[in-house]
Each structure stands twice: as C-alpha cells, then as structure tokens.
Image: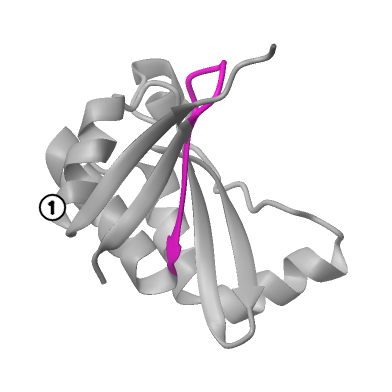
C-alpha cells in the first residue's frame, strides 16, 4: 500500500493524484474525515469507484477520459464540493483511479490524508513556461 505518490496542483489550483482503486476510495474517505463533511459529489464518486468496470466501459464507449460526478447546487454555493472529476485507468489487471479534487479543498488536507495512508508525497506544481 505505501509508496511514493505525486500530487499535481495545476494553475487553477485543482489537485490530481493517481492511486490504485482501493486506495483512491480510502483517500476520499480520509479527506472527508479531515474536512468534517461529505458532499453529494463524494458520494457519487464512491458509487463510480465501486462500479469501476461498468463506468470504465461506459466512458470508453462514449470516448470520454473523465467521469464527472453530479454536484449539488447547495454544495457548490457553500464551497463544499470535494471531487471535481475522476479518471478511470486500466493497466493490465491493475485498476487505477485518477482523482481530481476541487480547487477549494486545501492542499495540506490531501497531503495529510495521503500520509495517513502511508504514502510519501511529492507535490508538483504545474505551470506554463
């Protein structure tokens, strides 16, 4: 489970991390615990991850790279959106989930959650040259 992981932060302050499927679900659960609330998009993200194969096939048929969980208007207004979108990846028998966190989720919360899962975290800021 433990290892090194890269947390990418883009110019829009969205955070992205790729983990094996089971660890991605654990990460979202840890972030929810750290934030102290769960949003509709996080619940929807759990549903997508638990039904990985079905959503992966659906996304491939529609030529989509990402699955965007539905978000509550209340959560958006209150700034309580956690998951922006998910990227589902298959590499042989491995199932990998790329999780894009909303820009309002603090970077330190995600880093702390990853460390709680036993990961060594490298933060990489993506900028245009």
Residue 7 in sight from this viewpoint: yes
On whether residue 19 falls in the magenta region, the answer is yes
Magenta stretch, residue numbers: 9-20
Q: Is residue 110 left or right of residue 58?
A: left
Answer above or below: position of 26 versus 116: below
Answer above or below: position of 17 versus 64: above
Q: Residue furthest top?
A: 129
Identify the image quadrant of the N terminus: bottom left
SS at mark 1 in the image: helix
Residue 114 x, y percent position in the rendering: 24, 49
Asked where in the image residue 102 lies, by quadrant, the reply is top left
Q: Is residue 120 left or right of residue 56?
A: left
Q: Residue furthest bottom?
A: 93
Residue drawn at (36%, 20%) of the image:
79
Q: Is residue 32 left or right of residue 66?
A: left
Asked where in the image residue 56 lies, by quadrant, the reply is bottom right
Q: Nearer the viewer, residue 38 or 17?
A: 17
Residue drawn at (48%, 35%) of the image:
8
Residue topped by disc 1 = 116
Residue 36 in sight from this viewpoint: no
Residue 127 x, y percent position in the rendering: 60, 17
Answer above or below: position of 20 versus 83: below
On whether residue 95 falls in the magenta region, the answer is no
Q: Is residue 60 left or right of residue 24?
A: right
Answer above or below: position of 38 versus 123: below
């Amino acid at each position: 489970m433990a290892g090194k992981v890269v947390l990418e932060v883009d110019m829009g302050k969205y955070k992205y991390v790729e983990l094996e499927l089971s660890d991605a679900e654990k990460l979202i659960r840890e972030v929810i615990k750290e934030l102290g609330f769960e949003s509709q998009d996080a619940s929807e993200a759990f549903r997508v991850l638990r039904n990985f194969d079905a959503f992966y096939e659906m996304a491939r048929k529609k030529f989509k790279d990402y699955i965007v969980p539905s978000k509550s208007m209340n959560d958006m207004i209150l700034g309580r959106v956690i998951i922006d979108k998910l990227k589902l990846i298959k590499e042989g028998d491995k199932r990998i989930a790329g999780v894009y966190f909303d820009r309002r989720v603090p970077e330190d919360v995600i880093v702390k959650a990853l460390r709680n899962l036993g990961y060594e975290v490298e933060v990489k800021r993506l900028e245009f040259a």
